[in-house]
Amino acid sequence: MKTQINQSKAIVQHLKDFCLSGIRDSFEELSKKAHSEDLSYEEYLLELLDRESEVRFNKRIERRLKESRLALEKNMDSFDLKLIPRKALQQTKSLLEGDFLDRSENVLAFGNPGSGKTHLLSAICQELIRKGRRIYAMPCSLLVQDLLLAKQNLKLASFFKKLRHFDALLIDDVGYVQHDRAEIEVLFTLLAERYEKGSIMITSNLPFSKWDRIFKDPMTTAAAIDRLVHHSIILELNIPSYRMNQAKAKGLKAGHDSEKNAHAANYQNEALAAK
């Protein structure tokens, strides 16, 4: 018995040294299983490696969700797909496969404020990350500030190199905030740098016909649109406010629940009075 304890301690220490936490946390359980099911050495080893692989994959997904900067509460579970147009629903199902990333295609989501653009793309991105993809998300207003800072520090090339590690960039609310000339230049440079090299996912309240408000002059506007649209999937979410519909639905449910509770209370009071 003492020998077995010493062996277990030695195994645990080796597994710690080799950073094999999945095997470390499960080898005793799987050892008992191997004995009870009369597994071969190879089968037992495969069980251990499968467990280690699973643990590492889950940790990797957790890290990638964190590095993405996505709002994790905006996921598929909290998004009502029934509220979006049929075409957008079909496109969403296709996007969830992730093949567009392999083709460096862009995803451009347009719609009125509150139409669910950010929520939908955030949810899609999270599902893709869980399939092993890397995605980086940031509001356009903050992204241009990071780009400007990198340019001022002569590190713009390094910043672009860092972004190349991501399968897609999600740039939220393009055109929501007005930018000055320097910000527009670095934003355009980013779009040009990513062209046909990596996917860009964009949400915007402004249709392309109004993008001259973003890039100021017609030539830059046309060049930016051309780079985005050339290989792209366009999601049109021109629907009544998604947020408003969600709020109404919650309000109706709350009202219905309140009414049910009132009926139940009245019934109990009547029952007590009858007694």
Image (cartoon, rainbow, N blue to C red):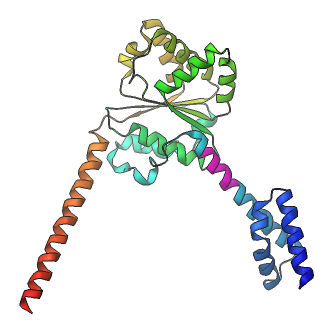
Classified by dominant secondary structure, the portion drawn in magenta counts as: helix
Q: Between residues 260 and 219, which one lies in front from this camera angle?
A: 260
Mark count = 0
Residue 241 position in % (x across, y down): 28, 39
Residue 63 drawn in magenta: yes
> Measured along the vertical axis of the image, is residue 101 above or below residue 126?
above
**Magenta-colored stretch includes residue 219:** no
Look at the picture and state if 10 lies above or below 154.
below
Q: Nearer the viewer, residue 135 or 107?
A: 135
- In this orientation, does residue 97 appear? no
Indicate the quadrant containing the N terminus: top left, top right, bottom left or bottom right. bottom right
Q: Which of the 4 quarters of the picture holds residue 136? A: top right
Q: Position of residue 51 (x, y in %)?
A: 74, 64
Residue farthest along the bottom direction in this orientation:
275
Residue at point 55%, 15% (across, down): 186
x 14%, y 73%: residue: 263
Residues in magenta, as a range: 57-65
Could you tell whether 123 is left or right of 39 in the image? left
